[in-house]
Image: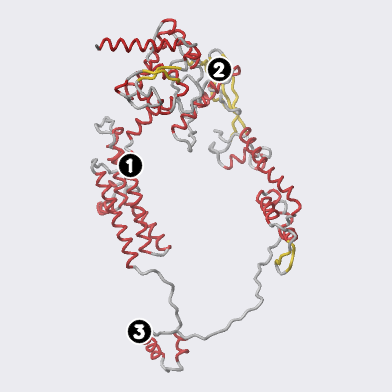
Amino acid sequence: MANCSANAKDTELQSQWAEIQRLPTPQQIRFSLFHEFGCGEGDLNPKPNNVRRCLIDVTKLQAPDCHLLIHNLIKHVENDNLLLLHNIRKRLDQVGVKLPSVEVRYKNLSISAECEVVHGKPLPTLRNYLQSKLLVIPWLLSTSQASNISIIKDVSGIIKPGRFTLLLGPPGCGKTTFMMALAGRLKHSLKSMGEISYNGYRLEEFIPQKTAAYVSQHERHIPEMTVRETLDFSAQCQGVGSRKETMMEILRREKQHGIVPDHNVDLYMKAVSVKGHKNSLQTDYILKVISRKDQEQYWFLCQFLSLFAVHQMSLSGFRFIASLFQTFVASFTAGNVFIITISLFGGFIIPRPYLPAWLKWGFWATPLTYGEIGMAVNEFLSPRWQKVMSSNITVGRLTLETRGLNFDAYFYWISIASLFLFIIIFNVGFTLALTFLKPQGTSRAIISFGKFYQRQRGENSNPADAINKVVRESIKGRMVLPFEPLTVSFQNVQYYVDVPLRIPKWWRWFPYLCPSSWTLNAMLTSQYGDIHMETFVFGGRKTVATFLKDYFGYDCNSLDIVAIVLILFPLTFATLFAFCIEKLNFQRR
């Protein structure tokens, strides 16, 4: 019965594959067999009782389809990834198809640069920069000299396909310049001689940027995009290249030899050979092979718990300090002292092994200590730090010992518990301070002894007796400081600010070059409404237009000119920006 079932499945597979091969070759690349899941009504959930294959259009694969396909191909990252690559190579070898390759040859390659000779170290200092920009008047600073320096001199070689080529050399020997020359991205300020060819074609005969890529050491990612969006964007920029033509040749030869490929491998190769996908199948493949493996190693939940506890502890501590000292100045000073103390005793400034014996208690009394212990133990005792060194100790354990944090793994939970204990203590202190401490009020009214005596001598001849009387009355809650009632009257009070002096004549050209001045001109002359309405300003009546003309120098009839100037400013700045990017070199060695 098992043999009959297997033969039936093979017959079904051959009939389905024959249905694909009967299509024209350009149409065959669009269809393949999808195995085991979701062969009808878009249902991609596993159905163990209904295992079958169905015909699917690879140009209409959705995100769940791509995810399930990669899951079928790579269930175990360490083994199935290499198996997939071997199966693709095996399919190519069966029909004798070779992937396109590129051989790079460089002959008598020489690169030189004209460098400026500066006094002192050749660093991009302000003096060197200004000196390079003011070469038209070198006598103002110092005499400038230039020299032609050879970076690469008469090198030849071949970079063969299918190999990793390692380029080694000390810093500043020209490695980056050499690679950028091969990639066709050499700077215009450098002079090159010799010949570089790709498969016999010189760089002048094609566009090398579409064939070779140079990966810089500087970060070039777009921070607003996720990992998936970045990989999808890169796949859309690169396109499918020659994969479509290669796949069509494979299908044509398999049809001639009657070869039925593995359906999962066929579906993967066809899906990456057609264009028009918003979500690339290669993105799912990369995330499956690389990213998820890294995420498992970082222990994200434990690190998050440590950071959360440290954050809450710091918030609670500063709240307690603010409630205890109440005023801004006192709280700010106490907060700075708190930061310095926890940084000093927490092992950040002075590691634990270097603390004096009589200060060891400060390490354990500091709340930030437990955050450091928790995060350090969780990180450096993880599997990726367990490589054993020659001294028979792991890299992670050695790192912990150098900082005096050589604790066992269970200290992570002790640290978390200690941090939450500090949180409770600080919050309890914060509540008690708000409950029992009196708020800071305003200063009490005071009076000098002489003034007080003068006001009271009509009743008592002795100042001491007067004070005793006031004290007795204050105890009874009836103390009132004497005052004389005064009456203040005012009428037609005017408040004004003196008009500032006008801009000096020798400086009046500046507003015409300042974009803010033109923007203020447009705002004032266009937003006042009725500019002919009279208003009372600076002790006189003037129309709005007259006031703007006399005080600011803005003419309400020149609004069209102002609008044109405001449009010209961004165009001018954009032109200058493009010119500087194109002509000036701000990254000279």
> In percent of the image, x 37 and y 58: which residue is there?
319
What amino acid does circle 2 point to?
Ile
Q: Nearer the viewer, mark 3 or mark 2?
A: 3
Q: Which residue matches tag 2?
A: 196
Image quarter of residue 210? top right
Q: Is residue 514 left or right of residue 67?
A: right
Per the image, label 1 sits on a secondary structure element best described as helix
What amino acid does circle 1 point to?
Gln
Please rate how many residues cluster around mark 1, counting C-alpha atoms within 10 Å: few if below 14, some from 14 to 19, many from 20: some
Give the Cα separation between the discs numbered 3 and 2: 102 Å
- Front residue of 532 and 372: 532
> In percent of the image, x 74 and y 58: which residue is there?
549
The percent coordinates of residue 399 (x first, y second) are 30, 38
Q: Is residue 134 left or right of residue 542?
A: left
Quarter containing the N terminus? top left
> In percent of the image, x 43 and y 21: which residue is there?
166
The percent coordinates of residue 442 (x first, y second) are 44, 72
Q: Which residue matches tag 1?
A: 303
Give the Cα separation between the discs numbered 2 and 1: 51 Å
Q: Which residue matches tag 3?
A: 475
